[in-house]
Amino acid sequence: MPYDASRPVLASYDADPYNATTRPPRRAVFVSSPDLWRAGFGGKHPLKPERLARTVALLTAYGALDAPNVEVITPRVASDEELARFHTLDYIDAVRRLSTGDDHVSAYRYGFGPGDNPAFRGMFEAAGLKAGGGIQSAERLLAGDCDVAFNFSGGLHHAAPSRASGFCIFNDAAVAIAYLVSEGRRVAYVDIDAHHGDGVQNAFYDTDQVLTISLHQDGRTLFPGTGFVEETGSGPGEGYSVNVPLAPNTDDPTYLWAFREIVPPLVRRYAPDVLVTQLGVDTHFRDPLTHMALTTEGHAALYTVFSELTMRGPLPAIPWLACGGGGYNLDVVPRSWALAFGVMSGQSFPDALPEAYRAAYGGIWLHDHEGPALDRATRTEARRRAEEVVSAVRSVMDL
Ligand SMILES: [Zn+2]
């Protein structure tokens, strides 16, 4: 079946979408500062700080950050004690020293070097702010100061306790979740980045205080090469680690079907105190690093499901901390994350991109007006493989 951009994905997948007319808009925190995008890996590295600047420019041009229910907060650098809830003190010290150009530290030993994770001056502050923003978001949610928080510069889900990995220095999501757990909260973490959320999964692999669910491109075809159905947790954590590896070329309908089969039932059954989502947008069909085939409409439908999950009908809402994540097409990332923040804060934006944004960065529409050019056999094969995986996950998770 040829892709039909006129077919509303939202309408076909969401019988009961979040309806802003029936509830007051949620109090939303957005964590932002130009300091987040001052320094980066540089050169031709795909993780360009400009993606953050563009996202804020788009939200600003739409007036989204001026809404009465929105508060923009400035991140602070996470303290060593906060980072040490997940990272080793040795690693924190090494990042700090490498960040100042200290060449007595072995960069390789800590995962830095040419390629994915080149050390750069100022990286302690750049990464520390993203982790600090996650902690601040979690603090605000627990204090009841807001209902949702978007730490859009975070979602750096590959970082390990003592190693940088996959463009990620400090694992802001793991640090924020560890803080929430230390405050006695049970957390569901759902990761929709194209890459497996290995760092966060590993952080909580042996505990039932955190349910991790990652949907991603099959690890046999993409970094980091993990995230298979059989990775289900260990010890008390057995059954609290869930992986949905999907075939390359998985499109909106198949991805949304798999997501709906797994995520809402598991999250509802777990009944978390807080939902943390990693909203990597590198599943987009135009992303240069991956081979998934979603559109911004598919992304918006996923954001809407998260929104519904955190509403819980007449029950008190579940605090929702959203992190950013991957996404390497500079035209796609701002649009998809603007849609995400719109869903979170109950705002919708005109499809025509604001003139100020267009003048600076180009583009015409907020939503995709075209989809991936995939033939029927390719879509069908991805669907067949998704059905196998979903069946396996449902069986393993006793769904
Ligand atoms: Zn990714």
Image (spheres, grey):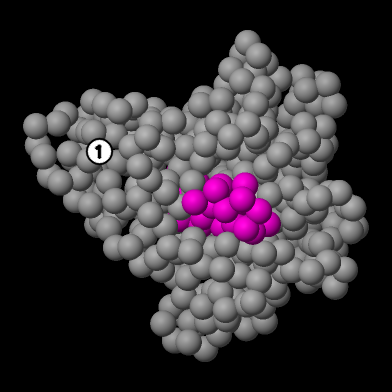
| Residue range (magenta) | 136-157
Asked if residue 317 is positioned above or below residue 363 in the image, the reply reads above
Q: Can residue 330 be seen?
A: no
Q: Nearer the viewer, residue 165 or 179?
A: 179
Q: Is residue 156 left or right of residue 341?
A: left
Secondary structure under the numbered disc 1 in the rendered image: helix
The image shows residue 159 at horizontal and vertical percentages of 41, 35
Specify few, some or many for label 1: CA neighbours under 10 Å numbering under 14, 14-19, or 20 or more: many
The residue beneath circle 1 is 95
**Foreground of the two, 75 or 21:** 75
| Front residue of this view, candidates 249 and 24 | 24
Residue 294: x and y in percent read 65, 54
Instruction: Give the residue displayed 48% in from the left and 64% down from the top.
Output: 73
Which residue is found at the position 11% from the left and 39% from the top?
102
Kindly identify the amino acid type of the residue bearing the numbered disc 1.
Val
Q: Which residue is at the far front?
A: 143
| As drawn, 38 above or below 325 | below
Q: Quadrant of the C terminus?
A: top right
Q: Is residue 38 visible?
A: yes
Q: Quadrant of residue 207?
A: top right
Question: In the figure, 363 relative to 285: above or below?
Answer: below
Quadrant where the N terminus is found in the figure: bottom right
Where residue 268 appears, as percent x and y from the top left, is: 81, 38
Asked if the residue at label 1 sits under 8 Å from ligand 1, the reply is no
Image position of 80 (left or right of 2):
left
Q: Residue at x 17, y 39 (%)?
A: 97
